[in-house]
Amino acid sequence: MVICLPVWLLIRVQGNIVMNSIALAFAGVLLVLATLSISIAPASAVPLSVRENIHTIWADKTGLDGGFTFIVIGDTREGDKVHLKLLKQAEAYEPLFILNTGDYVSNGYQKEYEHYAGLVQSLRIPILNVVGNHDVAKETAAFDRHIGLRNWYFDYGNCRFISLDNATGGFSRETLDFARKYLHTDKTCFVAFHKPPAYDRWKVHSMDSDGSGGRGGEMMELIASSNVALVFLGHIHLYDEMEIGGVPYVISGGGGAGLYKKYGFGKAEYGFVVVKVGPDGVSHEWIPLEK
């Protein structure tokens, strides 16, 4: 929006130049409008912002009474064709939001984020993005500009959603402190971070071990002692699930990037997880890509 403001509005009265107070007042109104038009960008201009999408979710009250559904997808990266098919398929479930467990771009460059933003811009469903290692691989400025937050949480009804940063290989002390603070709640928690813990069969492609400073063990103990219903992960390009400390950990990494069939576990196929939250509790199901 462009507004052309007059530098001055004058009226000549009997040869004298007199400032017209009404015209000046009108110019002031236009100045305010011009300022607003510059400082407030259209919502579609930043479709990836965590803050904006959380506010969009809060504005939707439909799930507060009878329950709601959300989708978990991950490792979409360069697989645009599959990614778009999955998003279209996901729309049929009328989810409150879509959670991407990370690696939605390949290197972290500005042009990649612009491409991702353009890809999902027409989607009418808020997308919440967890930071993955590829998302900040070469640079971090574009992530900060488009996504904005690495550790974040929000409440919706009696549920709390918490995203934690282990993109560089482990959990920092800052991230652990964030988790301790926001997992301390009576609400039902859903936790997401990109790299699976170095545990059991997932050690082949995981976050750093505790011996290497990953602090995954400390985080798993914290999760086990909190009211966590599900933990969502990515990084391994397939679907798999494991119970750790009594809590289900779910990898949803079949969002579009090349599948990992070499490991011999899980389901190396494209798809997403549907999570339903209602008065009777929480359920989740893996949904493969429609042929």
Image: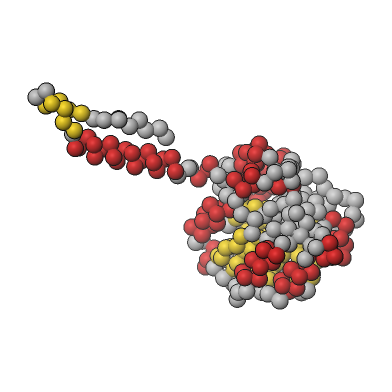
> Residue 188, located in which quarter of the rendered image?
bottom right
Q: Residue furthest top?
A: 15
Q: Position of residue 118 (x, y in %)?
A: 61, 39
Left or right: 85, with 53 as reference point:
right
Residue closest to the eye, 152 or 174: 174
Nearest the viewer among 92 and 210 is 210
Q: Nearer the viewer, residue 263 or 25?
A: 25
Q: Nearer the viewer, residue 283 or 3?
A: 3
Viewer can see residue 18: yes
x and y percent of residue 125 in the render? 58, 50
Q: Residue at x 79, y 62 (%)?
A: 214
In the rendered picture of this protein, how many numbered marks are placed on residues? 0
Q: Is residue 233 visible?
A: no
- Residue at 53 percent across and 43 percent down: it is 44
260 displayed left or right of 62: right
- Location of residue 172 by image quarter: bottom right
Q: Quadrant of residue 142?
A: top right
Q: Residue at x 68, y 74 (%)?
A: 226
Q: Position of residue 169 (x, y in %)?
A: 78, 56
- From what the image shows, is residue 24 above or below residue 159? above
Q: Is residue 49 above or below residue 189?
A: above
Could you tell me residue 37's position as x and y percent? 41, 40
In the displayed structure image, the side of residue 241 where residue 136 appears, left or right = left
Residue at the (71%, 76%) spot, across then down: 225
Figure quadrant of the C terminus: top right
